[in-house]
Image: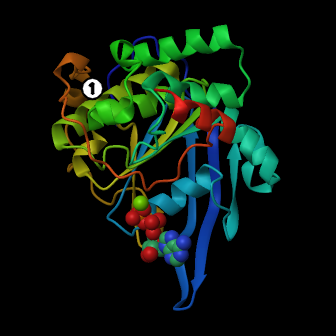
Amino acid sequence: MRTTPRDAAPATGHPVLRAAGLSRVFTGRAGEVTALSEASLTVAAGELVVVRGPSGAGKTTLLNLLGGLDRPTAGTVHVGERELTALREDKVLELRRTELSYIFQSFGLVPVLSAAENVEVPLRLLRTDPAERERRVAHALGLVGLEGHARQRPYELSGGQQQRVGIARALVTEPSLLLADEPTGQLDSATAARIMDLLGELIHQRGLAAVVSTHDPLMVARADRVLEIHDGHLSEPAARGHAPDPLQAAARPVAPVTTEDTAPASAPAEEPQPEPLTRAELRRRRQRP
Ligand SMILES: Nc1ncnc2c1ncn2[C@@H]1O[C@H](COP(=O)(O)OP(=O)(O)O)[C@@H](O)[C@H]1O
Ligand SMILES: [Mg+2]
């Protein structure tokens, strides 16, 4: 879809994510629900794939399987050369800490930590040394235009700013694969468009492979490729021409952060949280004045 050249875009092409014949059947008291049916997709480095579909279509199920948060009933997922679906749980965790990052609809920030401390969490889990952590956290916050907000806690930030922290946290480990499940689902449409622009810029600049789900047709503007999902079936869109003009969309600059709305968001944190700090560390931080 994208027709304009990208500045400083690394060569795209080599597949980072490959899913083949992915199915997920949930068994409950009401019987079996096929949430995903034989989904296949390949995403190359530097490619942003948007998966669009209504609520209940299977977006979260698909992204959870791609990110190793859930196991498929059938099918395989490869991240780089490794088959995620064949790995033991500890190896999946390791892959999730190094190769892939997840952005949540409800931001998934730890409320008692500052913006900088939230971004630092994945580096602590990797036991990166403190000086290097500090450097990389500052860089990641700079990428999302939040260098002046490092010490604020999530409740002191707007929804858009909180999702910028979520993006910084996802990028700080320099993953090759980024997965975002309705990352703009809790934002007003103007903020959502800015966040999607920022995500698109960063994904293309940094040569990440990315899968972003949305139910918003306007969110496809930054996509290289759009897939649709309905009742667990993933497919190329049947008809073209409904998406916003990609040329126009690509020409739109990333909005400066100073225009971000500043009203604190009241987003509930119901999404899965990132792996927390140790209990002792959390206790220590809660006791802080
Ligand atoms: N843990 C579960 N148990 C039973 N059914 C589920 C579970 N998770 C999702 N589903 C069902 O699978 C379908 C797809 O859900 P989901 O992937 O959350 O859709 P979306 O993210 O597109 O809204 C829905 O019918 C949903 O009710
Ligand atoms: Mg969902």
Instruction: Check disc 1 and report the residue beneath it.
Output: 250
Image x and y of residue 143, in percent: 42, 16
Q: Position of residue 118 (x, y in %)?
A: 51, 30
Nearer to us in this view, 287 or 121: 287
Q: Residue at x 64, y 47 (%)?
A: 18
Q: Is residue 196 visible?
A: no
Secondary structure under tag 1 reads: helix
- Residue drawn 53% across the image and 48% down it: 273
Q: Amino acid at mark 1?
A: Ala
Q: Is residue 4 above or below residue 167?
A: above
Quarter of the image where the N terminus is located? top left
Q: Residue at x 59, y 30 (%)?
A: 121
* Residue sitting nearer the eye, 93 or 20: 93
Q: Quadrant of residue 74?
A: bottom right
- When asked about the image quadrant of residue 71, the answer is bottom right
Number of other residues with Cα within 10 Å of mark 1, as a class: few under 14, some 14 to 19, many 20 or more: many
User: Residue at the location (40% across, 12% down)?
Assistant: 7
**Residue 133 or residue 101, whichever sits in front:** 133
Q: Is residue 98 left or right of residue 263?
A: right
Report if residue 58 is visible in the image.
Answer: yes
Q: Residue 167, how many percent across, how many down?
A: 44, 31
- Residue 176 lies, in percent from the top left, at 61, 30
Residue 59 vertical placement versus 195 (above, below): below
Outermost residue on the bottom side: it is 30
Determine whether, in the image, residue 148 is placed left or right of residue 89: left
Q: Is residue 152 above or below residue 135?
A: below
Name the one closer to the observer, 143 or 150.
150
